């Protein structure tokens, strides 16, 4: 296997990357990094949700995100420390155009967000899913649906039953929560932890498969070493 190369301070293995099995490794402390992107209409609360997960607080004031903001948090799953790198993307078309390719490149998991008090943000999920599929994101990449702003109980426009049906149809788990309500912070945490756990399980399996395949490859290379065939 080729040696890993250092890209943006992270070690990446070109072989794994081309197979979509890449999970980056933080070179200094040897942590695996899971890249999770947060997608959805402007104003649904993507920045607030990522703040809540990574910083534990609700920001007093937010501006529309331009391009992308990175936040990260190190979590521990079954004794392994993993860096969850959250990409808080821009919902406004004019602030995301040039960045879209970067959002989806080597992504490990996707969080689709809508605002439970705004039906259009739920209806627009179809477009977000299309964009994601249009960037060849593998069906193996776990995706979840998040209905945010549940604290605004009197203004709910998207019934849970409707959201659940949509989530089921797209093979996603549904989380209804609030980035604002501190009582919901555990629920926000579980969105990202659920994805990190899925990724850890999936990647452990994939790496085991890769190792097995590599073992086979090395064996067949060894047995072919005397072959006259040049390839
Ligand atoms: N009541 C309530 N307000 C929220 C919640 N989450 C976010 N907000 C408010 O919704 C507005 C938009 O939040 P942002 O997190 O900036 O929205 P965004 O999705 O990042 O928007 P873009 O960056 O433009 O894509 C802000 O005024 C937040 O204070 C929530 O759970 N409950
Ligand atoms: Mg934002």
Image: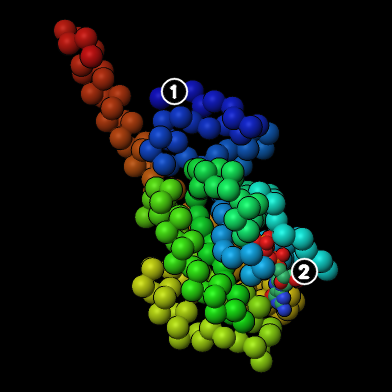
Instruction: Name which residue lies at 34% across and 42% down.
Output: 209
Q: Is residue 76 above or below residue 180?
A: above
In this view, the residue farthest toward the left is: 228
Q: Is residue 218 above or below residue 227?
A: below
Instruction: Name which residue lies at 23% across and 23% down.
Output: 220
- Is 104 situated left or right of 65 in this image? left
x and y, in percent, of residue 53 in the image:
68, 63
Q: Secondary structure at mark 2?
A: loop
Which of discs 2 and 1 lies nearer the camera? The answer is 2
x and y, in percent, of residue 162 in the image:
45, 83
x and y, in percent, of residue 96 in the image:
61, 51
According to the picture, the residue beneath numbered tag 1 turns out to be 2
Q: Foreground residue, 170 or 72?
A: 170
Q: Are marks 2 and 1 in contact (CB under 8 Å)?
A: no
Instruction: Name which residue lies at 55% across and 79% down.
Output: 119
How far, Cα to Cα, is label 2 from label 1? Answer: 44 Å
Q: Which quadrant of the structure image shows residue 7?
A: top right
- Is 15 situated left or right of 160 in this image? left
Quadrant in which the N terminus appears: top left
Q: Secondary structure at mark 1?
A: loop
According to the picture, the residue beneath numbered tag 2 turns out to be 58
Ligand 1 within 8 Å, label 2 CB? yes
């Amino acid at each position: 296997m080729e040696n890993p190369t250092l890209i943006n301070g992270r070690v990446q293995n070109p072989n794994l990357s081309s197979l979509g099995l890449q999970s980056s490794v933080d070179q200094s402390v040897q942590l695996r990094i899971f890249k999770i992107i947060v997608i959805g209409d402007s104003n649904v609360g993507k920045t607030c949700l990522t703040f809540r997960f990574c910083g534990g607080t609700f920001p007093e004031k937010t501006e529309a995100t331009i391009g992308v903001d990175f936040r990260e948090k190190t979590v521990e799953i079954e004794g392994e420390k993993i860096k969850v790198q959250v990409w808080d993307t821009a919902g406004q078309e004019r602030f995301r155009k040039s960045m879209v390719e970067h959002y989806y490149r080597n992504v490990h998991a996707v969080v689709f967000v809508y605002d439970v008090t705004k039906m259009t943000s739920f209806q627009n999920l179809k477009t977000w899913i299309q964009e994601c599929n249009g960037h060849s994101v593998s069906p193996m990449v776990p995706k979840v649906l998040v209905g945010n702003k549940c604290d605004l109980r009197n203004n709910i426009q998207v019934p849970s039953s409707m959201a659940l049906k949509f989530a089921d149809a797209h093979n996603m788990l549904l989380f209804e929560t609030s980035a604002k309500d501190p009582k919901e912070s555990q629920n926000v945490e579980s969105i990202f932890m659920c994805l990190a756990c899925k990724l850890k399980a999936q990647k452990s399996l994939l790496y085991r498969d890769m190792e097995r395949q590599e073992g086979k490859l090395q064996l067949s290379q060894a047995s072919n070493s005397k072959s006259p065939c040049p390839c």
